[in-house]
Image: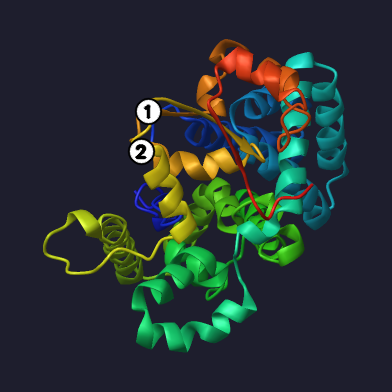
């Protein structure tokens, strides 16, 4: 119940575990199973489970790109925190093994290009900017919506504060851990360190830092239950935590849907005038097959053109049966289409090409 009501799974910024079989849900599930297996391998020395663990690494790579990042970083940090050489060997070996398989090698290559694009274009993420933080008192007076948007979407320390309130209980109590709880604590500390690192500007390309806690939420609540069973944590505190979870989730729902709720009299957040002009330009056109430059820009535009049936972006035009093959045939990297745009025009019936002005690579 604690896991299911965690505000971390109901974010302001983007979708999370919102489906039964989507990538994030399965990636989380397979990672949880891998963590359980690894407890028995690393702590209980049941090395016969290593092939099974390797199989779930294979599933993680084929399911969720973010779960790949989490697996790599969490196992690396866990091996350091616990002094587990076998964890480090398994991590390196699993990556080498995955590179030897064409399907997973393609996914890892794609992920590398994904990192490369975000590293070069980190400014578009706009998180934890000191200049914006300084302006917050002014925004609170003149533009309250922008004030709340910054803290709830772009300021990662506050995001963790409201998304995972239980983590502050953990660091407020003393626990004499047994082997399972110590294992959970090491994984949770790994997530915390990853969160701190990926909140820094040079590492923003590694994704939304708070998401790394998704994979260790179960461990967090197991630790809290351990505190409760040892009488260190009062029942009233757990009830209060559940209440905080529910209130926060309701608040997030209202905040995400306030424009559709008549009893909330707030205007819409200000939008980019250039974006608004682009949408107004595309809307009346009967058919738009749009290639963006860089290609990754289409992910941003997809959110705003989702209900525009006349607009197809590159990812929607691709043959879904050969997804990675299409990327190899049509692109130089995740950010650059091939130079022969005439070939893409013939292949997909392109009608428009959009260039991001700030992109000059």
Disc 1 is placed on an element classified as loop
Q: Is residue 273 above or below residue 38?
A: below
Examine the rendering and report whether any part of residue 181 can be seen: yes
- Is 219 in front, or is 215? 215
Mark 1 and 2 residues: CB-CB less than 8 Å, in contact? yes
Look at mark 2 in the image and give the residue it sits on.
283
The residue positioned farthest toward the left in the image shown: 263
Q: Residues within 10 Å of mark 1 (few under 14, many from 20)?
A: some
* Residue at screen point 41% across, 49% down: 3
* Residue at screen point 69% across, 28% down: 57
Look at mark 1 in the image and give the residue it sits on.
310
- Is 193 in front, or is 253? 253
Examine the rendering and report whether any part of residue 51 can be seen: no
In the image, taking residue 173 as reference, residue 162 lies left or right, namely: left
Q: Is residue 8 above or below residue 24?
A: below
Q: Position of residue 58 (x, y in %)?
A: 69, 23
Disc 2 is placed on an element classified as loop
Q: Position of residue 112 (x, y in %)?
A: 77, 37
In the image, taking residue 309 as reference, residue 62 lies left or right, namely: right
Disc sitting over residue 75 in the figure: none
């Amino acid at each position: 119940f604690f896991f299911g009501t965690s505000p971390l799974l109901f974010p302001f910024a983007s979708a999370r575990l919102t489906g039964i079989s989507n990538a994030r849900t399965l990636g989380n599930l397979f990672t949880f199973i891998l963590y359980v297996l690894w407890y028995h391998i690393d702590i209980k020395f049941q090395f016969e489970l290593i092939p099974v663990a390797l199989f779930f690494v294979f599933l993680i790579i084929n399911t969720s790109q973010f779960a790949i990042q989490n697996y790599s970083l969490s196992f690396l940090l866990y091996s350091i925190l616990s002094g587990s050489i076998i964890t480090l060997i398994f991590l390196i070996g699993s990556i080498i093994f995955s590179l030897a398989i064409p399907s997973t090698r393609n996914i890892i290559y794609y992920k590398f290009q994904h990192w490369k694009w975000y590293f070069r274009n980190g400014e578009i993420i706009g998180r934890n900017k000191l200049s914006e933080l300084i302006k917050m008192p002014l925004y609170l007076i003149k533009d309250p919506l922008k004030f709340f948007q910054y803290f709830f979407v772009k300021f990662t320390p506050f995001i963790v504060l409201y998304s995972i309130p239980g983590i502050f209980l953990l660091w407020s109590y003393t626990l004499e851990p047994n082997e399972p709880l110590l294992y959970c604590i090491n994984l949770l500390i790994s997530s915390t360190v990853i969160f701190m690192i990926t909140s820094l500007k040079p590492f923003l390309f590694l994704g939304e830092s708070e998401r790394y806690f998704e994979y260790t939420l179960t461990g967090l609540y197991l630790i809290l239950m351990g505190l409760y069973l040892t009488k260190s944590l009062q029942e009233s505190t757990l009830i209060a935590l559940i209440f905080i979870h529910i209130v926060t989730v309701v608040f997030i729902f209202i905040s995400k849907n306030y424009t559709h709720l008549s009893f909330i009299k707030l205007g819409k957040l200000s939008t980019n005038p250039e974006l608004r002009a682009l949408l107004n330009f595309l809307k009346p056109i009967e058919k738009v097959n749009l290639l963006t430059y860089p290609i990754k820009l289409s992910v941003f535009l997809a959110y705003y053109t989702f209900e525009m049936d006349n607009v197809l972006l590159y990812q929607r035009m691709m043959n879904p049966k050969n997804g990675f093959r299409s990327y190899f045939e049509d692109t130089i990297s995740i950010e650059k289409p091939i130079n022969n745009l005439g070939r893409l025009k013939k292949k997909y019936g392109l009608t428009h090409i959009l260039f991001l002005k700030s992109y000059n690579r």
